[in-house]
Amino acid sequence: MMLFFILSLWILTTTTLAIPPPPPIQCTTGTTGCTLHNSYGLWGDRKDCFAPQVIYPTTQDQLLLIVANATKYKLKLKVVSKFSHTIPKFACPAAGASSVLVSTEKYNSNIDVDVDGLVVTADSGVGLRDLINKVEEAGLSLVTAPYWEGVSVGGLISTGAHGSSWWGKGGAVHDHVVAIDMIVPAIQTQGFAKIVHLDATNDQLFNAAKVSLGTLGIISKVTLSLEKGFKRSITFNFTDDTGIEDAFINHAKAHEFGDITWYPSKHTAVYRHDDRVPLTTKGEGTNDFLGFQSNLIAVSKSTRATEKALEKAKNVKGKCAMASSFIGYKKLVANGLKNNLIFTGYPVIGRQGKMQTSGSCLYSPSIDIASACAWDPRINGLSFYESTAIFPADKFKDFIRDVKRLRDLNPNNFCGVDIYNGLLIRFIKASNAYLGQPTDSVVVDFNYYRADSGTSPRLNQDVMEEVEQMAFLKYDARPHWAKNRKVAFSKVGKKYKSFNRFMEAKMKIDPNNIFSSGWSDELLFGNKGLDYDGCGLEGECVCSEPRHCSPKDGYFCESGLVYKEARVCRYSQSSLS
């Protein structure tokens, strides 16, 4: 029944137009200041981000003037893109009336493709899809991109966005950056601001700027390397997960853009065989990833309501039925790959620009209010956490073995994560960027249910917390800068061998911390935030006493089942009674 329901949804949504996502900055008439949201409409701490003043520059000269005024009058600046598709609050301005939020939404008019030089230079506010389309029109291809295209050029390199590859320059977009123009504070005789051009000739500042978290200055232009246009051929191989802890390295070496999706509760691994092929290869396929397509609002609300009801009833088997239906449907439609208008069989072959990234729910014209991105905060649809851990390749095998041990205690406890995307395994090459990956690395993403209230525990909450703590505490995995709950960033500076060099560059470029805020200071300078009742439920702390969980609901702080040093919020009926 569930599979038929989803199939009906797919047939409908392939012909239904959708409302685009809301702007991240909301200003109410008659009030002072505005509120900044991320694309999910909900920050990690569930607290609003207030912006006393918002500026929408359209030119580099205007950016220069903004930084000059901030330097002269000792203001605080933060930059946000049109999309604001990030979970941590790096874009949130410092508290107080002296803060200014700069949006690059309208700073997006210039995309210059140098065909002979095999590079493209774009304003930082340019959207990834616009950039890719312009490059492909010139007969060239951008080699890597994140899987979600709802990001800006400046935002995606600032946060270390990536695809999947250990080949060539690797899967991280910032490792394909050739040059960056950045507006930074300056002394009075230089007009209080200046444009610095950074490239490989000034390694220290360039390697700091490639992943800068918006804490150095305002990126104005980015130059990326390109290659001659090519196509990709993709096949998804659904198989048993036996030996996945040994197979991942060979898979990454064998396929230029390969990844693996692991559904632990179903003992299933999906190996993505993804390689470039010549432009002359027959095929005009597209990657329209199922999770990034428009969904009927009624169906998104119904799916959310179903999962909420299962959570409330502690119905694990119901969640497993949902997971089975969703995985079955993904297999049926190749998770959104289309040979033409629909999926008709493997391999799916198409141009790089149509295969490397997706996000069709972003662009539907707002002439029909029946459908939207499934997580659009206005529709009460999906709400979830997204944890992303980045492992040195030599530690990943042991992590997988630990997760298997935890899974084997009760596979049904992993059905909640398999409702979403299971564990998505990707690959990033070692980088010279100070906040890039210091070694060849394996990235694991997993999404899971988030309650409507920060005080509401989740079904099998302890399982995902144990996996999270295994990753970040036992195996010292590094967090993705644009994702994760707060606990993932604990002692993050110690996990990067060049972290101190980044901080030295920051103090050199922005000695007065104009581009800092309370959140970024807590992260970069190790300032400790306060714990509070229930902080363990939202990943704002690792629980150390019962009040960090929810004793009244039967959730207490206990040790992990496999990783004994973990401290997780676990439901205990006996403790409640």
Image (spheres, helix red, strand yellow):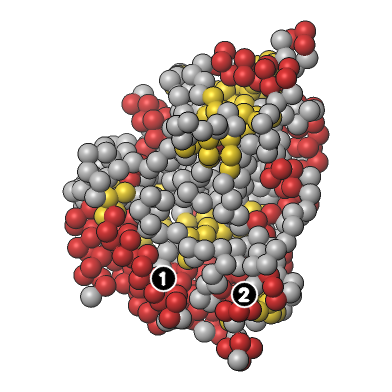
Front residue (pair 141, 477):
477
Q: Which residue of the protein is positioned furthest toward the front in this rendering? A: 30
Residue drawn at x 57%, y 79% is 553
Residue 239, given in percent of the width and then of the height, sits at: 40, 71
Task: Answer above or below: position of 27 versus 308.
Answer: above
Considering the image in quadrants, where does the N terminus appear? bottom left
Front residue (pair 209, 188):
188
Q: Please state which amino acid type lies under the numbered disc 2.
A: Ser
454 on left or right of 12: right
Q: Which mark is residue 308?
A: 1
Task: Answer above or below: position of 501 versus 540.
Answer: above
Can residue 454 be seen here? The reply is yes
Residue drawn at x 72%, y 14% is 192
Return the disc, 2 or 1, that comes first in the chain's sequence.
Answer: 1
Would you call the spot at circle 1 few (<14 residues within 10 Å), some (14-19), or many (20 or more)? some
> Are the two marked residues, 2 and 1, in contact with CB atoms closer than 8 angstroms?
no
Give the residue pinned by disc 2.
550
Residue 329, given in percent of the width and then of the height, sits at: 29, 66
The mark total stands at 2
Q: Nearer the viewer, mark 2 or mark 1?
A: 2
Q: Which mark is residue 317?
A: none
Picture quarter containing residue 477?
A: bottom right
Residue drawn at x 50%, y 24% is 56
Front residue (pair 7, 31):
31
Alpha carbons under labels 2 and 1: distance apart: 18 Å
Residue drawn at x 27%, y 50% is 371
Picture quarter containing residue 529?
A: bottom right
Q: Please state which amino acid type lies under the numbered disc 1.
A: Lys
Q: Identify the secondary structure beneath mark 2.
A: loop
Considering the image in quadrants, where does the C terminus appear? bottom right
